[in-house]
Amino acid sequence: MIKKYLHNKIFLTGFCMFSFMFILMLLSFIWIPYDYNELNMSDKFSPFSFSHLLGTDFQGRDVFSRILIATRISFFIGFTVMTAGFITGIILGSVSGYFGGIADLIIMKIINTKMAFPGILLALMLVAVSGGGFGTTILALTIMSIPRYTRITRAGYIKYKNSLFVLSARAKGASALRIMYLHILPNIISDLSVTCTLSFALAILSESGLSYLGLGVPIDLPSFGQMLSEGKVKLFQSAAAVLVPAFFLTVLVLGLNLMGDGIYEENRK
């Protein structure tokens, strides 16, 4: 399926950027040159070199090692939020769109209420109340992502539930679950794939924003947001403290967005 999209230049550009970050994420499980929390005050603000590929920060910690861990954290949170939102959204959207009636009314009232409340404010509230951490961050960001999946899934099910192939399957005695997830769902996966890339990117950006405020992942773990927060204080002593994590965060998020744009373009042809 991916071969179809690789002919699209926008998708290919995003795919290359995403692949570069994916390789860094894999590398973080195989090799990390230094302990990412090891302090060495005598070696702070070291420039790029063979011993420290991306230099060191204001506490002498190896920046490349911290970038590797931050990339791993971003992929973990982004993928987890995307998957949880995808599964939950499909279940809610399929029930709402296929059965309609009171189920549709209740589900869409909940979804519309959630969409009326800014997602990032809800995430900030949940994280602030519970004290942050991986679990709370993922839960908050997942709640943010569910309405997008639900609305797209619901629209797809409304579109196809009275199609000829569905009526044929129903006439042959196929169960509602079989029709919903083996007949209709494959026809809307291409639309949902665009939402997946955007949800992945938004989860990473939102986590970075929460970590920037000190409300995201635990403070002893480096994340892009935390590195940006620490770097801004020392911006005039070392611009790289901000530019390096900002560069890698931009590559990852922009790559995902370009992939989504490429998929959308190909799906419209």
Image (cartoon, helix red, strand yellow):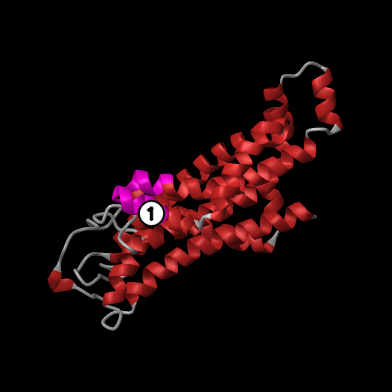
The residue depicted at 31 percent of the width and 47 percent of the height is 130
The residue depicted at 78 percent of the width and 40 percent of the height is 159
Residue 177 visible somewhere in the drawing: yes
Q: Which residues are magenta?
A: 123-139
User: SS class of the residue under badge 1?
Assistant: helix
Q: Is residue 63 rendered magenta in the image?
A: no
In the picture as drawn, the residue positioned furthest to the left comes out as: 42
Q: Quadrant of residue 187?
A: top right
Q: Quadrant of residue 243?
A: bottom left
Q: Residue 260: x, y in percent?
A: 63, 56
Vertical order, 80 against 240 (above or below): above
Towards the viewer: 130 or 240:
130
Would you say 13 lies left or right of 122 here? Answer: right
Q: Quadrant of the C terminus?
A: bottom right
Q: Residue 224: x, y in percent?
A: 37, 62
Find disc 1 in the rendering and name its residue.
Answer: 125
The residue depicted at 51 percent of the width and 61 percent of the height is 253
Vertical order, 185 against 216 (above or below): above
Vertical order, 268 against 186 (above or below): below
Would you say 173 lies left or right of 41 here? Answer: right
Q: Residue 2: x, y in percent?
A: 65, 48
